[in-house]
Amino acid sequence: MPEYPTALGAASKDEITLLGHSLANDVMGEVGFGELAFWLATQRRPTPGETRVFEAVLAALADHGYTPTAIISRLSYLSAPDSVQGALAAGLLAGGSRFLGVTEDCGRFLHDVLVAQEQLPTDDAGWDDLARATVQTQREAKKFVPGLGHHVHKDGDPRTPRLMAIAAEEGVTGPHLALFAAIGRVHPEILGKTLPLNGAGVCGAALADLGLPLELLRAFALLARTAGLIGQLAEELRHPVANDIFLSVDLNNRPVDPDPYVPESF
């Protein structure tokens, strides 16, 4: 008979186990959801400090107002109120390179820079030197630094210093956060302007420092946003705005002449 090994959930006639523990006796009422999500992803129980940072990340990414993820969830619910799962899925599918995806992009970018170093810096001056070289390389390649800049918080994302402070308080500041902080310090002298460190980007750096799989960084952002989307739908039930959004477009569209697509010539 084939076998399908798993260290996660298993059920027998009399017991359910999760991560080798009794679900009813050892997990329910004893382990918070954030801690459990970390535990499920890593199959190791996080320390209290790691749990605090991880849950701070989830809180930071849960909701950011009327973003496309929220709007599309509300509109999907308006169109199909019988499918709450469809409304949630629509919002999650809208998480990409412009919204939520920067968490993954930033974590991966910082990791790629770090693994290319023979030796990591040991003080702020060393991190600043590495950050200068990193920003300069991106500028010469005419590429953005993931996590640098925000379309709303142009003078500073309030999530960034708070998450860095929590990580420092818990003693889990690692090389990803150190490099990201250094990029924040030195980029103005290279780019000639000051850009904020994006809160979603610092979340990616923090998650990477916690040792979470880089391939799942966006998944954690989506986990956080799921809670926010539930909140958006709950508010939509009590104070609906989706129909107004729909009518605003429907009643204000303007017919124009066709604009045929012309393929680029070589």
Image (cartoon, rainbow, N blue to C red):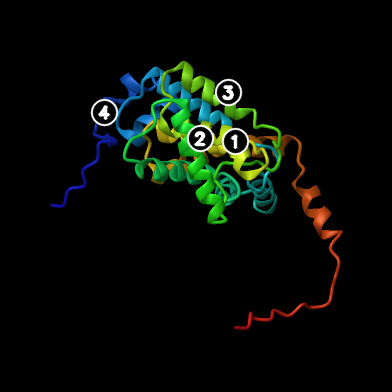
Observer-side mark, 2 or 4, equals 2
Label of residue 197 in the image: 1
Q: Residues within 10 Å of mark 4 (few under 14, many from 20)?
A: few
Q: Earlier in the sequence, mark 3 or mark 1?
A: 3
Q: Residues within 10 Å of mark 2 (few under 14, many from 20)?
A: many
Cα separation, mark 1 vs mark 4, equals: 47 Å
Q: Is 176 placed left or right of 140 in the picture?
A: left
Q: Earlier in the sequence, mark 2 or mark 4?
A: 4
Q: Which residue is mark 3?
A: 162
Say whether marks 1 and 2 touch (CB < 8 Å): yes
Q: Is 220 placed left or right of 59 in the picture?
A: left
Secondary structure at badge 1 equals loop
Q: Which residue is mark 2?
A: 180
Q: Position of residue 96 (x, y in %)?
A: 55, 51
Q: Which residue is mark 4?
A: 15
Residue at image point 83% right, 77% down: 257
Residue at image point 51% right, 20% down: 166
Q: Position of residue 116 (x, y in %)?
A: 36, 45
Closer-to-camera residue (145/251): 145
Cα separation, mark 3 vs mark 1, equals: 12 Å
Q: Indicate whether 169 appears above or below 14.
A: above
Q: Earlier in the sequence, mark 3 or mark 4?
A: 4
